[in-house]
Amino acid sequence: MTTTTLSYQGSPIRLRGAMLNLTDMWQAADRPPNRRPSDWLALEETGRFRTHAGTHRNDADDLFAPNAGLAGICHLDSDGLVATVRGNQGGTWAHWQLALTYARYLSPPFHLWCNTVVRTAMQRPDEAPAAGDDPLRAHLDQQFQRLHRRLDILDVLDRHAADLMFLTLSTQDLLLGTRRDFSIASQAAIRRAVAAEPYRGQCPCCDNAPVLNREGRPVAGAEFDHFFHCRLNRPEHGWLICAACHDDLTHGGYVLHFSRMPRFRAFQAAVLEQRRRGRMRMRLGSTAE
C-alpha cells in the first residue's frame, strides 16, 4: 500500500490506507507542548472514544483494517486503531477517525484543514495532492478570487452612485436657486452635535482639527458647510467643518464630495439624535409642570 504525503503549511503529513501519522500532525501544528500523540492518547476522553469506535467496528468496512500496510510495526494496539512504527515510516499512526479527533485537540484551524483535505484525499486517492501542494489553500485562493470579482462589481456601483450624485447636485442648482444661510437656531443645533460625542469639538469631516473653542463657539476659519446644496439650510443639511475640509468640498468636485458622504451621514445622524433628545427633554419638562 502506497503512502500519500499531504502538506499543511509546508509540513508533510503521511497518509497510508486508513492510517494517518499523528507525529507528523503534531509537528505540522507547531509542536504544541503537552499535546504530543502520547499525551493525547493517555487522556480518559480519548480512551472513551476508542472504546466507542471499537464497539461500532464493522469487519466488512476496510477503513477499520488494522494492517494499513505499515512496515516495521513494533506495536499494534488491540483495537487496531493505533500503531507505533520504526524506521522511515516511523512515529505514531492512527486510524483516520481517531486522527481527526486528535486534529481538533491540536487546533481549530488545523482541524478544519484535516476535515477538508484528509477526507478528500481518502475518498479520491487518485487525485491526492503531492507533497508541497495544499488543496485547502487552493480552495481559499479560489474563494478570494470570487470575492475580488464581487468587490470589482461594488466598485462599479460606487462609481455609478457618484455619477448619480453629480446629476442630483446639478439638478438642485437648476431648481433650488440662490444660497440660504443657516439660521441661528440651525447653527446652534449643529454646534451641539459637534460638541457632543464622538466629535468633542473636532471637525466631523476629518477629525484632525478643532472647530469649537472651549466656550463652544466656532474657531477662526471654521465654516457652516451646506453638504447637499446651498439652498438647503436645515440643521441636518449641513455641518461645522474646518477651513481645509471646507475648501476641499468647495473646490474638490463631486467625486470628493461623494467620498465624504459616510462621514456626513454619521454627523447627520448625530444632529437628528440631538434633536430627538431635545424634544424628549421638552416633553419631560411639560409633564413636570
Image (cartoon, rainbow, N blue to C red):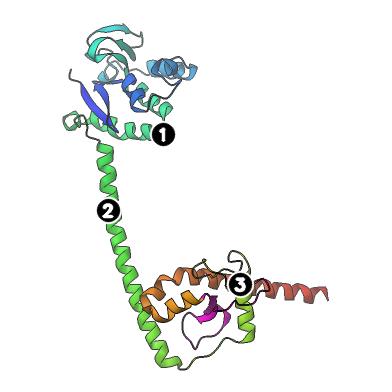
Q: Amino acid at mark 1?
A: Pro
Query: Which residue is tagged 3?
Result: 193
Query: Which residue is tagged 1?
Result: 108
Of the two numbered discs 1 and 3 in the rendering, the one whose residue sits closer to the viewer:
3
Quadrant placement of the N terminus: top left
Query: Which residue is tagged 2?
Result: 146
> Mark 2 Cα within 10 Å, few/some/many (few <14, many 20+)?
few
Quadrant placement of the C terminus: bottom right
Disc 3 to disc 2, how far (Cα)? 42 Å
The residue drawn where x is 37% and y is 79% is: 253
Query: Is disc 1 in contact with disc 2, using a CB cutoff of under 8 Å?
Result: no
Q: Amino acid at mark 2?
A: Arg
Q: Which residue lies most toward the right here?
A: 289
Which of the pair 235/224 is nearer the observer?
224
> Element at badge 3?
helix
User: Is 82 positioned to the left or the right of 203 in the image?
Assistant: left
Q: What residue span does the magenta drawing correspond to?
A: 214-242
> Element at badge 2?
helix
Give percent across and percent down for residue 279: 69, 75
The residue drawn where x is 57% and y is 68% is: 202
> Element at badge 1?
helix
User: Is 42 positioned to the left or the right of 185 in the image?
Assistant: left
Does 117 appear above or below 63? below
Give percent across and percent down for residue 59: 29, 15
Disc 1 to disc 2, how far (Cα)? 25 Å
Give percent across and percent down for residue 49: 43, 20
Indicate which disc, 3 or 2, sits on the residue closer to the N terminus.
Answer: 2
Disc 1 to disc 3, how far (Cα)? 46 Å
Give percent across and percent down for residue 167: 35, 83
Of the two numbered discs 3 and 2 in the rendering, the one whose residue sits closer to the viewer:
3
